[in-house]
Amino acid sequence: MLVFGCTNSTYDKVSNENIDNERLEFAKQISHKLLNAQENGEYYQLKEKEATAKMVAGLDQKRQMSSYETISGKFGQYENLEFVELLKPKDGTLYEVYRFKGKFSSNAAVEIRTTLDGNGKLAGMYTLDWKNKM
């Protein structure tokens, strides 16, 4: 998956009452669609209405299949994800970083980090070992 790096010191946690539930649901669904398709040996074709042009080009079929091979080799088979928190940059840029706990067959603690741009499009996504703080 493509990586969008961040450190907690430059991000603020958004309180639950200030989260746009429509954008949260989109971030959750697009993450699930991508990982679920890959788990089933399929390719999820991103559309430009749901992802930046860079993500559409970057998450082509070859990249998705190779990424999932790495993910499943490390964490097992993807099963589901659960929202944990939303972070926004302190510098005022419009990116939103959604942190999900991924459920995988290995029962490993996994983070699925999904970034939306200011237009609500997928701008980054990756998986890593879970840490309580970003």
Image: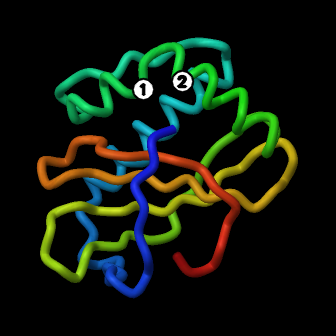
Q: Is residue 105 left or right of residue 21?
A: right
The residue located at (31%, 79%) in the rendering is 14
Callout 1 touching callout 2 (CB < 8 Å): yes
Dot 1, crowdedness within 10 Å: few (<14), some or many (≥20)?
many
Q: Is residue 72 left or right of residue 57?
A: right
Q: On the image, numbered disc 2 is attached to which residue?
A: 64
Amino acid carrying mark 2 in the image: Gln
Q: Position of residue 68 (x, y in %)?
A: 65, 29
The residue located at (41%, 61%) in the rendering is 98
Q: Is residue 34 above or below residue 87?
A: above
Q: Is residue 25 left or right of residue 102?
A: left
Q: Nearer the viewer, residue 54 or 103?
A: 54
Q: Is residue 78 above or below residue 41?
A: below
The residue located at (52%, 68%) in the rendering is 84
Q: Quadrant of residue 59?
A: top left
The colour scheme of the drawn protein is rainbow
